[in-house]
Image (tube, helix red, strand yellow):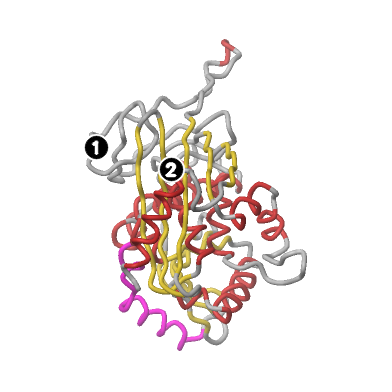
């Protein structure tokens, strides 16, 4: 939730921010009280910046976090959000827009994503690893440094379980395992680096929507070393493309380390935009396509592009409703989620 009001330091705007702090949305309260309130470096909530009230702000990381409900995905809401984001980012800040359903349906992974973005921001500011600002920001989420290495992981008290030492997926109810070995810089006299061989995970995704826009559902199935994990969810008012994107995002958020990801989807919108680099071009041009029209769903694309940087991604388009067992299962689960809101 973000509200535009008057000039900077407007007393009325400051009073409104105080009111919003007392009346936070369910998702804002969850993220604040269960994660950001005790996080270091410090976050502020309902912060006034250049005539806007942003949901959460970290001064040291120069990071703004906005939680978006369904009203933000209507045409007027998307345009307003883009104007607000552009103005805030001209101050040298980074704006992260996160859908409310990601907070409610995959909370711990959203926390890890935010922790990674804070670390990334601190590193971009050339903060020394020994500096207190860098040392305080620790959580079990791998830094996206390409296909060949991960950074050392630290603890942040997040209650995530693992499938065991054989897997890289989280699985509620499974026995918690020790973290996988981390790559590290060896003693200087050895003159060589430890190499980490990444695991290969298959990710099948699908989205469904009735009315478009209308009630929708999504599903992601992850497979690794004989272990499968199914994730699914839905929204009361959404679009088919948003559900397709959400499925991929939720699947990648479930990975607890950098992996080789074989992504299978029947959505040309998703596969072509990633494989052919279109989405990166939209982002570079301020979410404007080659035909000069706005690229839709920039909030989800921003999150997805950030997540793909954590892994070595391979893309596969599969024909929908055909003979791919896992695509068909994704479709059935996504439709089942959609029907819960119909």
Q: Measuring from the top left, give residue 211's x and y in whole percent.
A: 47, 75
Q: What is the secondary structure assignment of the residue under circle 2?
A: helix
**Left or right relative to 69: residue 297:** right
Mark toward the start of the polypeptide (1 vs 2): 1
Q: Residue at x 34, y 58 (%)?
A: 105
Comparing 121 with 127, the one in front is 121
Local secondary structure at mark 1: loop
As measured in the structure, the alpha-carbon distance from the residue carrying label 1 to the one carrying label 2 is: 25 Å
Name the residue at the right extreme: 291
User: Which quadrant of the figure has residue 291?
Assistant: bottom right
Q: Please identify the quadrant where the N terminus is shown.
A: bottom left
> Local crowd at mark 2 within 10 Å, few (<14), some, or many (≥20)?
few
User: Few, some or many C-alpha atoms within 10 Å of disc 1 (few <14, some 14-19, many ≥20)?
Assistant: few
Q: Nearer the viewer, residue 114 or 319?
A: 319
- Tell me if residue 44 is in the magenta stretch: no
Give the percent coordinates (x, y) of residue 95. 55, 63
Return the residue at label 1. 174
Seen from the viewer's position, the closer of residues 147 and 62 is 147
Left or right side of 55 for 25: left
Q: Is residue 325 left or right of residue 172?
A: right
Q: Which residues are magenta?
A: 10-31
Q: Tally the marks.
A: 2
Residue 58 vs 133, above or below: the answer is: below
Query: Residue 241: horizontal and vertical position, in percent?
Result: 54, 63
Q: In the rendered view, would you say 137 is above or below 93? A: above
In this view, the residue farthest toward the top is: 190
Instruction: Report which residue position mark 2 lands on.
Output: 325
């Amino acid at each position: 939730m973000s509200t535009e009001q008057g000039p900077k330091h407007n007393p009325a705007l400051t009073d409104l921010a105080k009111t919003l702090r007392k009346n936070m949305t369910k998702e804002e309260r969850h993220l604040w009280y269960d994660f950001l309130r005790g996080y270091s470096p410090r976050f502020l909530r309902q912060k006034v910046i250049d005539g806007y009230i942003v949901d959460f702000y970290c001064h040291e990381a120069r990071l703004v976090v906005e939680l978006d409900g369904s009203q933000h995905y209507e045409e007027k809401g998307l345009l307003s959000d883009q104007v607000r984001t552009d103005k805030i980012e001209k101050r040298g800040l980074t704006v992260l827009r996160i859908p409310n359903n990601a907070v409610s349906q995959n909370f711990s992974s959203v926390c890890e994503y935010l922790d990674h973005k804070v670390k990334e921001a601190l590193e971009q500011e050339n903060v020394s690893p020994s500096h207190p600002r860098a040392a305080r920001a620790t959580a079990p989420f791998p830094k996206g440094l390409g296909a060949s290495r991960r950074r050392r992981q630290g603890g942040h008290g997040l209650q995530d379980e693992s499938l065991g030492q054989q897997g890289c997926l989280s699985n509620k109810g499974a026995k918690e395992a020790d973290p996988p070995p981390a790559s590290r810089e060896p003693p200087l006299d050895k003159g060589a680096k430890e190499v980490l061989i990444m695991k290969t995970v298959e990710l099948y995704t699908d989205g469904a929507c009735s009315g478009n826009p209308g009630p929708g559902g999504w599903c992601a199935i992850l497979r690794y070393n004989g272990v499968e994990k199914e994730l699914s969810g839905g929204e009361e008012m959404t679009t088919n493309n948003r559900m397709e994107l959400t499925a991929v995002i939720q699947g990648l958020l479930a990975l607890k380390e950098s992996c080789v990801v074989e992504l299978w989807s029947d959505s040309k919108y998703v596969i072509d935009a990633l494989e052919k680099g279109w989405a990166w071009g939209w982002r570079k041009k301020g979410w404007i396509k080659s035909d000069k029209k706005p690229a839709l769903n920039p909030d989800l694309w921003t999150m997805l592009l950030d997540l793909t940087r954590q892994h070595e991604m391979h893309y596969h388009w599969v024909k929908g409703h055909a003979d791919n067992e896992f695509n068909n299962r994704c479709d059935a689960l996504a439709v089942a989620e959609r029907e819960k809101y119909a």
